Image: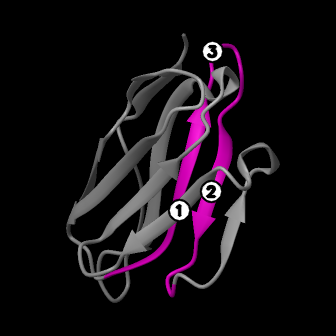
Amino acid sequence: QVQLVESGGGLVQPGGSLRLSCAASGSIFSVTAMDWYRQAPGKQRELVADITRDGRNYYYLDSVKGRFTIARDNAKNTVYLQMNSLKPEDTAVYYCNVKGMSSATDSFNSWGQGTQVTVSS
């Protein structure tokens, strides 16, 4: 089993910044994709950012480009999301998702517990 522990959410004023962290632990043989999703009330969960294993390729949701930065530390099996210039529309529960192999033959696809980000004055 692979567990993900998220941290870093909270209440911030518009224009402020937050940094989310997600650490994976447990039966990890290797980690491939590491992603951040978010889900606002009444809306579907959406992919916010994705980073490849080598950290060279990224995906960002159009509405967060230039404001959010995803990074990963493979030695710590941790993924980060630096969120700057936050807007009220960024308010949502943010979830990390990590995929990889728990052994040479078994894969895993784990989700964090979610962390609330609220942008409000």
Give the residue pinned by disc 3. 41
Q: Nearer the viewer, residue 16 or 61?
A: 16
Which tag, 2 or 1, sits closer to the chain's start? 2
Residue 2, position as x, y percentages in the image = 27, 60
Disc nearer the start of the sequence (3/2) = 3
Residue 70: mark: 1
Disc number lying in front (3 or 2)? 2
Identify the secondary structure beneath mark 3.
loop
The reply, left or right, for residue 23 in relation to residue 86 is left
Q: Residue 92, percent across and down? A: 56, 25
Q: How many C-alpha atoms fall within 10 Å of the one at disc 2: few (<14), some, or many (≥20)?
A: many
- The CA distance from mark 3 to mark 2 is 19 Å
For badge 2, the amino acid type reads: Ala
Membership of 24 in magenta stretch: no
Task: Report the amino acid beneath label 1.
Answer: Ile
Q: Residue at x 66, y 28 (%)?
A: 87
Number of the front mark, 2 or 1:
1
Q: Quadrant of the C terminus?
A: top right
Question: Magenta stretch containing residue 44, yes or no?
Answer: yes
Percent of width and height locating residue 34: 49, 65
Range of the magenta residues? Answer: 30-54
Q: Position of residue 93 (x, y in %)?
A: 50, 28
Amino acid bearing label 3: Pro
The tag on residue 49 is 2
Depth check, front residue: 19 or 106: 19
